[in-house]
Image (cartoon, rainbow, N blue to C red):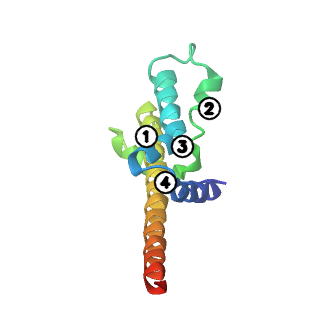
């Protein structure tokens, strides 16, 4: 499922070229990810276990769940003082890294789409010039 989501995110980035400039496209395209991260930080850093909403806590982790947990976990452990311990620091780092991975994939799709649009525009220009 995560590979399908990542492919979809790449295609979504490609599609945003036709409607948005880069920065608004990234912000709007990943708005759910930014919102998820804010809810995650709110639920896990500001509330204790007894005050936390299980629904919001679970929902806030869904966006970054589409990235490979093994990949983000291996990097997140670098933020721990002990490499054998996994604490809230690791989990928070995994959420942030997951959002960054999704932004990178979206950006790769956006760049690929922009290159394709420029090539199509150049072909259209040369076709119009040669037909005159």
At x 57% / y 59%, what residue is drawn? 11
Q: Earlier in the sequence, mark 3 or mark 1?
A: 3
At x 34% / y 41%, what residue is drawn? 79
Label 2: state its secondary structure: helix
Label 4: state its secondary structure: helix
Q: Earlier in the sequence, mark 3 or mark 4?
A: 3
At x 54% / y 50%, what residue is drawn? 67
Mark 1 → mark 4, Cα distance in angstroms? 15 Å
Q: Earlier in the sequence, mark 1 or mark 4?
A: 1
Quadrant showing the N terminus: bottom right
Q: Which residue is mark 2?
A: 59
Packing grade of label 2 (10 A; few <14, some 14-19, many >=20) is few
Label 1: state its secondary structure: helix
Packing grade of label 1 (10 A; few <14, some 14-19, many >=20) is some
Disc 1 vs disc 4: which is toward the camera? 4
How many numbered marks does the figure carry?
4
- Seen from this angle, which residue lies furthest front? 132
Percent of width and height locating residue 85: 43, 38
Number of the label disc, if any, that sits on residue 64: 3
Q: Which residue is mark 1?
A: 96
Whether pointer 2 and pointer 1 mark residues with C-beta atoms closer than 8 Å, the reply is no
Does residue 23 sit above or below 55 in this rendering? below
Percent of width and height locating residue 55: 65, 25
At x 47% / y 49%, what residue is drawn? 20
- Seen from this angle, which residue lies furthest left? 81
Whether pointer 2 and pointer 4 mark residues with C-beta atoms closer than 8 Å, the reply is no
Mark 2 → mark 4, Cα distance in angstroms? 21 Å
Residue 56 placement: quadrant: top right
Mark 2 → mark 1, Cα distance in angstroms? 15 Å
Q: Earlier in the sequence, mark 2 or mark 4?
A: 2
Packing grade of label 3 (10 A; few <14, some 14-19, many >=20) is many
């Amino acid at each position: 499922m995560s590979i399908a989501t990542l492919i979809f995110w790449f295609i979504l980035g490609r599609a945003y070229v036709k409607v948005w400039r880069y920065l608004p496209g990234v912000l709007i395209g990943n708005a759910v990810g930014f919102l998820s991260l804010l809810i995650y930080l709110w639920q896990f850093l500001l509330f204790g276990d007894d005050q936390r909403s299980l629904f919001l806590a679970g929902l806030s982790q869904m966006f970054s769940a589409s990235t490979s947990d093994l990949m983000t976990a291996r990097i997140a452990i670098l933020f721990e003082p002990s490499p054998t311990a996994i604490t809230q620091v690791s989990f928070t780092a995994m959420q942030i890294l997951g959002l960054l991975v999704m932004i990178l994939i979206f950006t790769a799709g956006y760049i690929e789409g922009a290159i394709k649009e420029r090539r199509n525009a150049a072909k259209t220009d040369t076709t119009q010039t040669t037909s005159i």
